[in-house]
């Protein structure tokens, strides 16, 4: 599962029957550099992910990729390979050595990512 | 399986039902030399891995399916806490 920011959604006019009724969100993966900088989340190559949580634009989500992304639809067999598994309320990140932040994500959206000076 | 460093935590209210009650951490996959590689990952942890700890991560979802059911989308599980890594120095 990777972290991503919801950038929008996709509506299909025609779809294979297995995909009908499944909400699709556009998710931009969050890179290590962007996460460490504490703001301006994203940076990765956007993908389309199935969403059953109602993630809205700006929400930080955890999305899975690959075969297990279709597991929530089991026993139905759906052609889904990316799935929003959670909407983040809060991220606490202390990766790297010079960039540290602990950020509140209210209602899934990062409000004010405070950036601490490195110690 | 691969090694990762624990860089943070994720708190989430709205999530897939099978993730309820699981501890979710932000992990960073490591190269053989210990340098970070790839995007940050959300890991499921049952051991209480600490900030900065090195852990072994499995991408096989069998253990998670056994714990929380077949419909879980999650796959990355902290399979062990690393004590020490022995490795031959590069020539």
Image: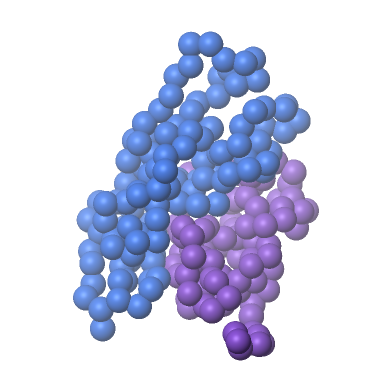
Q: What's the colour scheme?
A: by chain
Query: Exactly how many numbered labels are in the figure?
Result: 0
Q: Position of residue B73 (x, y in %)?
A: 63, 45
Q: Nearer the viewer, residue A92 or A29?
A: A29
- Judged left or right of residue A77, residue B38 is left
Q: Quadrant of residue A67?
A: top right
List x then y, in percent, for residue B59.
67, 57
Q: Is residue A87 above or below residue B86?
A: above
Residue at image position (57%, 60%) is B43
* Horizontal relation, residue B81 to residue A45: left or right: right
Query: Which hue is chain B drawn in?
Result: purple
| Residue B53 visible, this orientation | no
Q: Which chain is blue?
A: A
- Using the rendered image of the protein, determine whether residue A22 is visible from the camera's viewpoint: yes
The residue that appears at 74% across and 50% down in the rendered structure is B65
Q: Which residue does the image show at 75% across and 58% down from the upper left? A: B63
Q: Position of residue B89 (x, y in %)?
A: 61, 88
Image quarter hosting the N terminus of chain B: bottom right
Q: Quadrant of the C terminus of chain B?
A: bottom right
Q: Against A115, is B88 above or below?
A: below
Q: Quadrant of residue A17?
A: top right
**Residue found at x 29% / y 61%:** A38
Counting from the top left corner in percent of width and height, residue B32 is at: 58, 76
């Amino acid at each position: 599962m990777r972290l991503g920011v919801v950038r929008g959604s996709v509506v299909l006019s025609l779809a294979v029957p297995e995909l009908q009724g499944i909400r699709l969100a556009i998710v931009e993966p969050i890179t290590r550099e962007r996460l460490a900088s504490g703001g301006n989340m994203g940076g990765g190559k956007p993908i389309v992910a199935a969403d059953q949580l109602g993630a809205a634009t700006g929400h930080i989500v955890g999305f899975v990729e690959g075969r297990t992304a279709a597991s929530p639809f089991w026993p139905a067999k759906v052609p889904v390979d990316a799935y929003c598994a959670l909407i983040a309320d809060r991220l606490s990140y202390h990766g790297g050595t010079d960039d540290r932040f602990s950020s509140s994500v209210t209602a899934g959206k990062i409000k004010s990512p405070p950036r601490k000076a490195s110690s | 399986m691969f090694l990762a460093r624990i860089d943070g935590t994720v708190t989430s209210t709205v999530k897939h039902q099978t993730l309820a009650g699981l501890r979710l951490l932000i992990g960073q996959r490591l190269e053989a030399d210990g340098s970070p590689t790839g995007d940050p990952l959300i890991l499921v942890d049952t051991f209480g891995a600490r900030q900065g700890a090195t852990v072994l991560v499995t991408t096989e979802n069998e253990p998670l399916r056994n714990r929380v059911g077949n419909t879980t989308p999650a796959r990355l599980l902290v399979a062990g806490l690393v004590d020490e890594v022995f490795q031959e120095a590069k020539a």
